[in-house]
Image (spheres, rainbow, N blue to C red):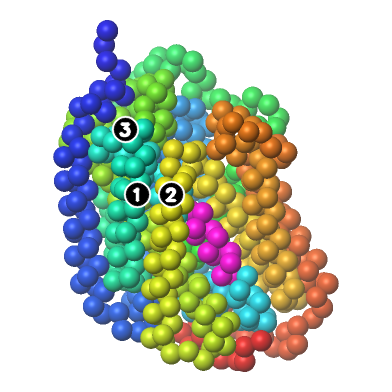
């Protein structure tokens, strides 16, 4: 009886080769981090890399920040298993960057200094608004970090030959990855993290291009032949793999669920704190726009490659073999690499995916630590009277604490359905941050009460609805399949929580009344958002 391909990969893939490839990446990035980390002398250096990155450099880093393991492994696996409906994930994620370009990038760079809290608090009472922004940033970052770190566990079987039953071995490796990520942030700050993202993005893009070109070349560069083979190799789906509806078209509720997911995917990128913080690493708004334009091209090109990889995996590996492998849908790209190039290509793809997790978590860690140190410690606890060196020291301590929480959460969530955590991070980000940012930048009447209602209300609704959704309980694909408290029928809360956050922001604004000196402060925001005047100096008014 022939051995299934998934088992072949687990048995033939060389753990020694995989370790060697990953170690080479780790050593290269550590050398870079230590070299650039020597120039971190001020808070601006640590938080924003001295605003010294060009638009193209920051655009590549933005792509590196956004193209996580979920984008590389998850979307490729979804395309391989559910076909066209998986392709829609990539389209939604790509469209989100147009929102970032048109509504966020330039205004964020001109109005803020280090964090999202700088923008939201500029024309409002700073202490409550900065606290709300920090709570949102920490929650979103931690959820996203846990999802990424836990995703490392799904790669263990293919990367190092550690079985799914060896929980201790997987926990040790998750802890090692988290420890390396903490070193990146402590030593390199934003400069080191940015260069890690640039290196990782280039490696990921090259790997995706090689896999896609090799796959199409396998069929004589005839895409129709590849799609035909994918249909023939999908016993259950067949031709449904090429048309909408395999996952989201079965019922009216499933269609609404997809609209909800799309809304979160489109508004999520422009609301994620670690993406927003990247706009402060460039010297001016023009470079901020250029960085988003570069990110759009790179991310769009990468998703085209991922679609080819996904259908290629369906053609050569088959959905049934993918679902039977360790990591299930996440194993599609590594299994395709093994089928195309054997142990060496499998080792490279698995190590690149693992390094992707490492780099994304580093970016999330510095964002969370900067938000706590700058918004909470410096501007709420110390009321703006703190030395920059002390603020950076608190940021480094926070990075260690957040990193340890992510490691612990990743170990606990290892083996669970971590896709729910990624979707929750997007939904919470869009629900908590988007309305507050848009209102703060473009609505003269918006005030502190509206900002607090929008942030806390949207965030709370998104979290509660997700907890009581089918993504967490009530079915075999849920995070807790053995229990059922799914009172909310949709797997993603975006269609409810995001509009509600806009509504709460508007209601809170009228309930709270007009801010003292609100017209003058909004006029200042208008000038600052259009010109960038005074952005580097931060907020020069009393803390309230």
Q: Are marks 3 and 2 in contact (CB under 8 Å)?
A: no
Rendered image quadrant of residue 475: top right
Q: Quadrant of residue 504?
A: bottom right
Tell me the tag on residue 174.
Answer: 1
Q: Is residue 58 above or below residue 381?
A: above
Q: Which span is picked out in magenta?
A: 133-144
Q: CA distance from mark 1 to mark 3?
A: 14 Å
Q: Measured from the top left, where is residue 148 in percent x and y? A: 42, 49
Residue shown at the point (52%, 47%) measured from the top left: 421
Sequence-wise, the earlier of marks 1 and 3 is: 3
Q: CA distance from mark 3 to mark 2?
A: 17 Å
For marks 1 and 2, give the CA distance: 7 Å
26 left or right of 47 in image: left
| Quarter of the image where the N terminus is located | top left
- Secondary structure beneath label 2: helix
Residue that carries the numbered disc 2 in the rendered image:
410
Q: Is residue 489 above or below residue 124?
A: above
Give the side of residue 10 with respect to residue 332, left or right. left
Residue 459, how many percent across, how many down?
65, 58
Helix, strand or loop status at disc 3: loop
Q: Earlier in the sequence, mark 3 or mark 2?
A: 3
Residue 454 seen from this side: yes
> Is 432 or 503 nearer to us in this picture?
432
Residue at image coords 44%, 71%: 398
Residue found 66% across the figure and 77% down from its top: 128
The secondary structure that dominates the magenta segment is: helix
Label 1: which secondary element: helix
């Amino acid at each position: 009886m022939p051995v299934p391909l998934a088992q072949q990969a687990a048995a033939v893939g060389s753990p020694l080769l995989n370790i060697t490839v990953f170690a080479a990446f780790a050593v290269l990035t550590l050398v870079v981090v230590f070299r650039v980390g020597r120039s971190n002398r001020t808070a601006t250096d640590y938080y924003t890399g001295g605003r010294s990155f060009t638009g193209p450099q920051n655009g590549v880093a933005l792509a590196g920040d956004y193209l996580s393991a979920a984008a590389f492994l998850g979307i490729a696996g979804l395309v391989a298993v559910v076909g066209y409906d998986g392709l829609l994930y990539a389209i939604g994620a790509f469209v989100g960057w147009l929102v970032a370009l048109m509504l966020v990038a330039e205004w964020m760079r001109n109005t803020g200094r280090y964090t999202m809290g700088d923008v939201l608090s500029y024309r409002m009472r700073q202490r409550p608004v900065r606290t709300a922004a920090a709570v949102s940033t920490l929650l979103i970052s931690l959820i996203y970090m846990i999802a990424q770190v836990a995703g490392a566990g799904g790669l263990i079987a293919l990367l190092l030959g550690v079985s799914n039953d060896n929980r201790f071995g997987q926990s040790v490796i998750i802890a090692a990855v988290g420890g390396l990520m903490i070193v990146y942030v402590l030593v390199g700050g934003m400069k080191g993290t940015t260069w890690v993202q640039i290196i990782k993005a280039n490696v990921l893009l090259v790997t995706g291009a090689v896999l896609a070109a090799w796959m199409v070349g396998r069929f004589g560069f005839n895409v129709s032949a590849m799609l035909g083979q994918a249909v023939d190799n999908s016993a259950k789906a067949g031709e449904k793999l090429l048309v909408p509806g395999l996952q989201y078209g079965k019922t009216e509720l499933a269609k609404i669920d997809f609209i909800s997911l799309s809304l979160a995917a489109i508004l999520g990128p422009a609301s994620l704190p670690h993406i927003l913080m990247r706009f402060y690493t460039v010297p001016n708004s023009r470079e901020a726009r250029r960085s988003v334009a570069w990110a759009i091209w790179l991310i769009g090109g990468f998703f085209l490659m991922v679609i080819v990889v996904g259908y290629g995996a369906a053609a050569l590996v088959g959905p049934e073999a993918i679902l039977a492998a360790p990591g299930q849908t996440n194993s599609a790209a590594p299994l395709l690499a093994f089928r195309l190039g054997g142990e060496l290509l499998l080792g490279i793809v698995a190590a690149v995916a693992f390094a992707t997790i490492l780099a994304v978590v580093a970016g999330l860690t510095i964002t969370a630590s900067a938000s706590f140190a700058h918004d909470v410690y410096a501007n709420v606890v110390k009321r703006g009277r703190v030395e920059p060196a002390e603020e950076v020291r608190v940021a480094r301590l926070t990075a260690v604490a957040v990193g340890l929480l992510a490691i612990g959460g990743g170990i606990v969530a290892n083996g669970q359905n971590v896709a729910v955590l990624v979707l929750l991070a997007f939904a919470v980000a869009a629900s908590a941050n988007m309305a507050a940012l848009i209102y703060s930048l473009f609505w003269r009447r918006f005030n502190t009460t509206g900002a607090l209602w929008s942030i806390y209300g949207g965030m709370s609704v998104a979290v509660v609805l997700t907890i009581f959704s089918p993504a967490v309980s009530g079915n075999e694909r849920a995070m807790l399949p053995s229990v059922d408290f799914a009172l909310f029928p949709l797997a993603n809360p975006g269609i409810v929580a995001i509009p509600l956050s806009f509504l709460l922001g508007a209601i809170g604004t009228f309930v709270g009344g007009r801010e003292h000196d609100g017209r003058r402060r909004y006029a200042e925001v208008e000038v600052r958002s259009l010109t960038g005047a005074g952005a580097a100096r931060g907020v020069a008014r009393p803390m309230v």
